[in-house]
Image: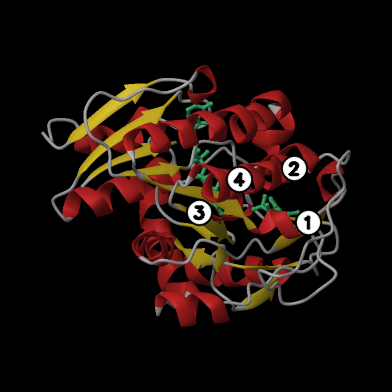
Amino acid sequence: MRVVITGGAGFIGSHLSDSYLGDGHSVVAVDNLLTGSEANVQHLTGNPNFQYMKHDVIDGIDIDGDVDVVLHFASPASPPHYLKMPIETLRVGAEGTYHCLNLAMRKNARFLLASTSEIYGDPLEHPQVESYYGNVSTIGPRGVYDEAKRYAESMTMAYNRSMGVETRIVRIFNTYGPRMNMADGRVVPNFIVQSLRGEPLTVYGDGMQTRSFQYVDDLVRGVRRLIECDYAGPVNIGNPVEITIKQFAEIVNEVTGNTAGVIMKPTDRIKDDPQRRQPDISLAKRELGWEPQVDLKAGLEKTMQYFRELV
Ligand code: NAD
Ligand code: UDP
């Protein structure tokens, strides 16, 4: 297969590239390096099955030759990034998705949208099932990301229903692993870097908000199963083990042996911060035969090995 991955030089995109190349497929990674880095795919240069294109998908996208699969992962993903780049985020979700769907249509390729648990906003239903419509403020700070992804889902379903494009939608819950940008402000790199430096971990708000963290290899397996199956509706892919951010900080400190503890840090970022997040993965289990395999401490150990080299 020839697989086009937008956002291919990002954290998740680079792991998808590794996975497809590892199975003998070819990959075209398209990225404008807005939040990603060529360092994430440097180990792939020289591989005859790997092609990298520095390109902004907002400007349209064309690829020479056959394409079997388009995986649309281009978008800022970290809250500090999309708060700083609101227009870029809205445009890559809207125009970027439109162009990538057109590419898939022209090439008669399958299309997969990287959607998100943020579709559910600050959820009033718990755990989150795909049938839940969500609780999102259109004008809140997170609206630029949440609404872009919600629009992208609608656009994807429109191409599925009225243009006959084979589409898939993955709703990704908090995913972590090596090659996360250490400065992107998400909780996993922040805590790991602080912990490796022997500093106290910055817990925002009261630390009682929850997340459910998934290791990147589990996500990659889920995405690959989803593109291969026949289910066109959105599918949650995430690890259902839910913990508070305060508990998460304690686990990170335990894994690194950091004794500096935590500090509670007031910040504007807690405006509209989802209070509880946990995927219901019944659908993924049933349709894909998928469930996560990597537990949190094992995943954190692997992620830490990567960050140790950088800190
Ligand atoms: P990332 O920032 O590491 O990767 C995103 C990549 O997209 C970057 O390399 C960036 O340069 C590229 N990009 C952004 N705008 C672009 C444009 N206009 N044209 C071309 N490339 C562009 O983030 P990530 O965590 O790897 O996220 C990848 C995708 O997965 C995103 O769509 C994100 O919304 C989705 N997602 C991630 C998570 C997670 O927990 N990591 C959760 C939910 C959804
Ligand atoms: N968070 C925190 N300290 C940090 C960074 C984030 O307490 O240094 C919290 C943040 O307020 C949120 C959770 O951790 O409740 C997850 O934040 P992240 O930016 O990783 O992504 P989100 O799940 O909010 O998209």
Report crowding for label 3: few under 14, some 14 to 19, many 20 or more residues within 10 A (C-alpha): some
* Res 123 seen here: yes
Q: Position of residue 33 (x, y in %)?
A: 46, 25
In front: mark 1 or mark 4?
A: 4
Residue topped by disc 2: 147
Distance from mark 1 CB to nearest ligand 2 atom below 8 Å: no
Left or right position of 17 against 256: left
Q: Amino acid at mark 3?
A: Leu
Query: Where, by quadrant of the figure, is residue 263 drawn?
Result: bottom right
Residue at x 71%, y 68% (from the top left corner): 277
According to the picture, the residue beneath numbered tag 4 turns out to be 158
Secondary structure under the numbered disc 4 in the rendered image: helix
Q: Which residue is mark 3?
A: 196
Q: Is residue 246 left or right of residue 166?
A: right
Q: How was this image coloured?
A: secondary structure
Query: Label 4 near label 2: C-beta < 8 Å?
Result: no
| The one of 74 and 164 positioned closer to us in this rendering | 164
Task: Tell me the kind of residue under disc 2.
Answer: Glu
